[in-house]
Image (tube, rainbow, N blue to C red):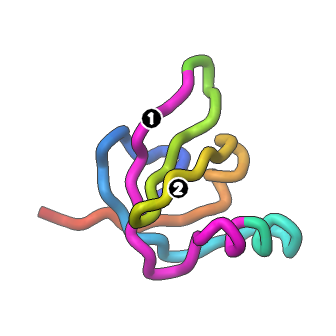
């Protein structure tokens, strides 16, 4: 298991856990982040800036600090 904040651009993964305080957990849930849901990183801003994450057909911008609370599994080839 690794953190979403460490995923490479274009790489696919599945959400395995969201480990955040209640308010952040509810915010991420409202944005569509759910255990078992596939996602990928579309873009990463310079200087440790936010990530553009694709969840199905929806793109969400997350700060690295928020992405660090989302654990993912990547498919093994």
Q: Read off the magenta span.
A: 28-45
Is 32 colored magenta in this rendering? yes
> Could you tell me if the residues under marks 1 and 2 are in contact, i.e. CB atoms within 8 Å?
no
Along the line of sight, the residue nearer the viewer: 58 or 74: 58
Going 44% across and 81% down the picture, which residue do you hit?
36
Is 68 colored magenta in this rendering? no
Element carrying mark 1: strand
Q: Position of residue 49 (x, y in %)?
A: 64, 28
Front position among marks 1 and 2: 1
- Outermost front residue: 57
Along the line of sight, the residue nearer the viewer: 5 or 34: 34
Going 24% across and 66% down the picture, which residue do you hit?
75
Along the line of sight, the residue nearer the viewer: 77 or 50: 50
Q: Where does label 2 land, which residue?
A: 3
Task: Tell me if 6 is positioned left or right of 13 in this view.
Answer: right
Q: Position of residue 63 (x, y in %)?
A: 69, 42
Task: Tell me if 47 is positioned left or right of 53 in this view.
Answer: right
Q: Position of residue 61 (x, y in %)?
A: 61, 45
The N terminus sits in image quarter: bottom left
Q: Residues within 10 Å of mark 2 (few under 14, many from 20)?
A: some
State the image quarter where residue 26 is shown: bottom right
Q: Is residue 37 above or below residue 58?
A: below
Q: Position of residue 59 (x, y in %)?
A: 51, 52
Element carrying mark 2: strand
Along the line of sight, the residue nearer the viewer: 76 or 29: 29
Q: Mark 1 to mark 2: distance in Å?
A: 16 Å
Q: Where does label 1 land, which residue?
A: 43
Task: Tell me if 12 is positioned left or right of 36 in this view.
Answer: left
- Outermost top residue: 47
Going 46% across and 63% down the picture, which residue do you hit?
55
């Amino acid at each position: 298991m690794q953190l979403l904040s460490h995923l490479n651009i274009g790489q696919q993964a599945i959400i395995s856990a969201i480990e955040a305080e209640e308010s952040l957990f509810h915010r991420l849930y409202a944005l569509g982040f759910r255990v078992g849901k596939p996602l990928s990183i579309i873009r990463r801003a310079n200087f440790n800036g936010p990530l553009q994450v694709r969840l199905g057909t929806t793109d969400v911008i997350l700060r690295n600090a928020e992405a660090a609370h989302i654990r993912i599994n990547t498919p093994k080839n």
